[in-house]
Image (cartoon, rainbow, N blue to C red):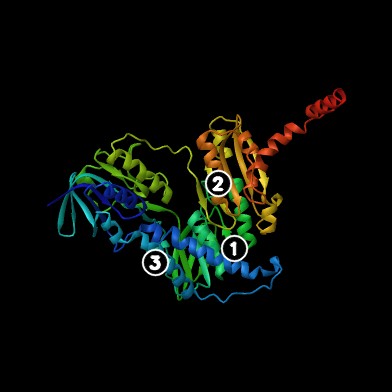
Amino acid sequence: MSKRDLVIIGGGAGGLVVASVAAQLGLKVTLVEKAAKLGGDCLHYGCVPSKTLIHTARVASLMRRGTDFGLPAYEPDVEMARVSDHVQSVIERIQEHDDPERFRGYGCEVLFGAATFLDEHRIQVNDREIEGRRFVIATGSQPFIPPVRGLEETGCLTNEDLFSLRELPVRLIVLGGGPVGLEMTQAFARLGSVVTVVERLPHLLPQEDPEVADALQAQLESEGMTIHTSTTVERVSRNGDETRVECSNGVVLSTDALLVAVGRRPVVEGLGLDKAGVIHTAMGIQVDRRQRTSRRHIFACGDVCGPYPLTHIAEYHAGIVISNAIFRIPKKTDYRVVPWATYTDPELARVGMTEQQAREKGIEPVILRFPFRQIDRALTDRQEAGFAKLVVHKGRVLGASILGGHAGELIHEIVLAMKTGARIADISATIHAYPTLAQVHRRAVNTWYGRKLFSPATRGLVRWINRLLP
């Protein structure tokens, strides 16, 4: 039986970071991945293929908008098979970074197969037992399929098969108005599908500021997408080549394809966690702030333990695990400044508190807004939709939502300001290159100083100074 310093179960973002560092530091490391390739959901079914498809769809949209830029408009002839091949080519290129031989070159043993705990220090992979001093569980998450009547028999698409479609659906219904659902809604609509979204809650993107989410909904609807909020799917059935979707408010929809994007669930089944004494529920593995499970030598990171199903959180968790499990330096998670983005067009990015969350905590925030239509670079690029919204208290940013072009990139100035405790005066005093979209931050902050600067009291003071001094 093999005995290893560190055994990692799961070859996605979190597991690969831990494996790379631990092996290069000279530990005896075994990495176990259930699938036939490394990279995890993000590379094969999530971030990478979705953003590739989104960019392709944006190019198609820009082709149709040629006249907006003084060029001829052109209706692209979309062949879904070629689009899917392009998506796979990008995956394959990035897959090179996750080549098993690269990790073996670091001294890491890489095994493919399902890992099951036999007890708290042993796992079985295929026909082999492996003993480990410490373990990291990084098995990720998978699509959640809701218990809708008829859905299992009718079948549906998820992110795990969406990117291998060879034909573009003429009609597509998307169940779920969260980030994945909306990104794919807009992408397929721009490629040529007639897309309808069904969301059971009153607002799309329920984790976001409703003001910002509603502004995004209006933008999507302006592009021709149909969106039903406060609508629950009650029954799904097959009628010939069509899928019939019956909803709670009497809405009956027909479609050629049905995409379910209502959330994800952690992969905990089949791991033998009970035999290892690792406490877990259907919501995932319980960990402390050092990413330790109920067995202190067994760690977990990424989607399998939450609280955010984001690749950058899995990588952040990996850093916490490396500190605690490898260097034995106590380090705890801190989720006070966590950014995320929805990659629609315009993008929606957020960090920290929303206006409503601040008020629920008894804070009376100052709200600073600035529209992209007043940013020169947004005008030159014809990306005028959206605005920046800052939630400020006592001169510091508590949170921000940005709806606009490249919002996922722009949010990081606010992330850094919050992380370092910078004041809004620091943002105002920082020189921002012209013309850039990043000027929206300074312009938003300066709306606060504008209120003070042009007040009757300040105007009177300026007149008095100029009368008094030569």
Q: Which of disc 2 and disc 3 is earlier in sequence?
A: 3
* Residue named by callout 3: 92
Q: Residue at x 67, y 45 (%)?
A: 370
Query: Which image quarter holds the C terminus?
Result: top right
Q: For the residue marked with disc 1, what is the amino acid? A: Met
Residue 385 image offset from top left, x and y in percent = 65, 54
Which structural element holds mark 1?
A: loop
What residue sits right under mark 2 in the picture? Answer: 411
Image-based side of 131 in relation to 257, left or right: left
Q: Which residue is mark 1?
A: 225
The amino acid marked with disc number 2 is: Ile
Badge 1: few (under 14), some or many (20 or more) residues near its Cα, within 10 Å?
Answer: some
Q: Is the residue 103 above or below the residue 21 in the image?
A: below
Residue 427 versus residue 175 in the image, above or below: above
Q: Report whether 360 appears left or right of 161.
A: right
Residue 250, x across and y down, in percent: 54, 60
Where 259 falls versus 200 (above or below)?
Answer: below
